[in-house]
Image: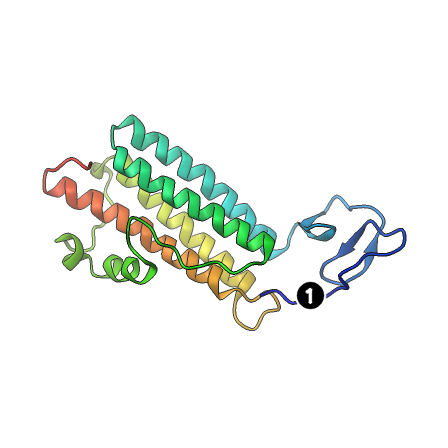
Amino acid sequence: MAKERFSAGIDGDAAFVDAESGGRLSAKPEHFTHLSGKRLVSKESERIAFRGRIDSLEAEVLEAQALADSLGQAWYCDALGEVLSFLREVLAAEVSEKPLPPPELFGLDAEELHRQSHDVKESFGLAHPVPDYRMGPLALRLNTLRTRIREGELLAVRAFAPGKDTERKDLILAMNRLSSALYWLFCRLVAGAARGTKPK
């Protein structure tokens, strides 16, 4: 968890505290933003970059849900709702600096998600699929989300890698498993299309 670099209380006329230096500030500079409470940090902070990516991912998942709904693929709309809920949990855990349990999505725990997404042949009966435009708009959207989550994982590593004051192995694991989850959804959809079955 993040180590405190400042005193818990803010006395005198200081309205804010610089979370990095511990310095007191009477007003919020425009290039700073809230880390939590009265704690401010530069908008270039790796933690703020991570929060921004989670915000973007939430928006993209909502768009994918709308697409799934428009295509009559209710199961995928609901599954993406689980992804959205977990992304919101990730953001809440980061802001509150509270531990985050590993994800449980689509009835699978974190380790099973990881296993099935790596052993696609056993799990779905096909080789690792190479994205192709003929797979259709939802499959392509799921693949795009997977890549975006991988980018979010890299931001998590930069912000929370072991050895940093802000170390958060739970958030790094969360992003890694979310990437597995989106690949799992992609493979499930492609496998269903290959069998000529419509997803439920």
Rendered image quadrant of residue 108: bottom left
Kindly give the residue lying farthest to the left in the view shown. 195
The amino acid on which the numbered mark 1 sits, given as a three-letter code, is Glu
Q: Residue at horizontal 20%, vertical 55%?
A: 128
What count of labels does the image hold?
1
Residue nearest the observer in this picture, 113 or 59: 113
The residue at 74%/50% (across/down) is 38
- Where in the figure is residue 31, as x and y percent of width and height? 72, 47
Q: Is residue 38 left or right of residue 179?
A: right
Residue 131 horizontal/vertical position (percent)? 25, 46
Q: Is 193 above or below relative to 38?
A: above
Q: Is residue 192 left or right of residue 24?
A: left
Q: Nearer the viewer, residue 189 or 113?
A: 113
Q: Is residue 12 left or right of residue 94?
A: right
The scheme the figure's colours follow is rainbow
- The image quarter in which residue 109 lies: bottom left
Q: On the image, numbered disc 1 is attached to which residue?
A: 4
**Residue 130, image x and y in percent?**
22, 50
Q: Residue at x 21, y 42 (%)?
A: 189
Relative depth, front residue between 8 and 154: 8
Q: Secondary structure at mark 1?
A: loop
Please report the residue visible at 76 percent of the width from the left and 57 percent of the height from the top.
18
- Horizontal side, residue 61 vs residue 112: left or right: right
Mark 1 surroundings: few (<14), some (14-19) or many (≥20) residues within 10 A: few
Question: Could you tell me which quadrant the N terminus lies in?
Answer: bottom right
Residue most toward the right? 12
Q: Residue furthest bottom?
A: 163
Quarter of the figure that contains the C terminus: top left
Task: Give how far across and how far down residue 91 sits, in percent.
Answer: 53, 49
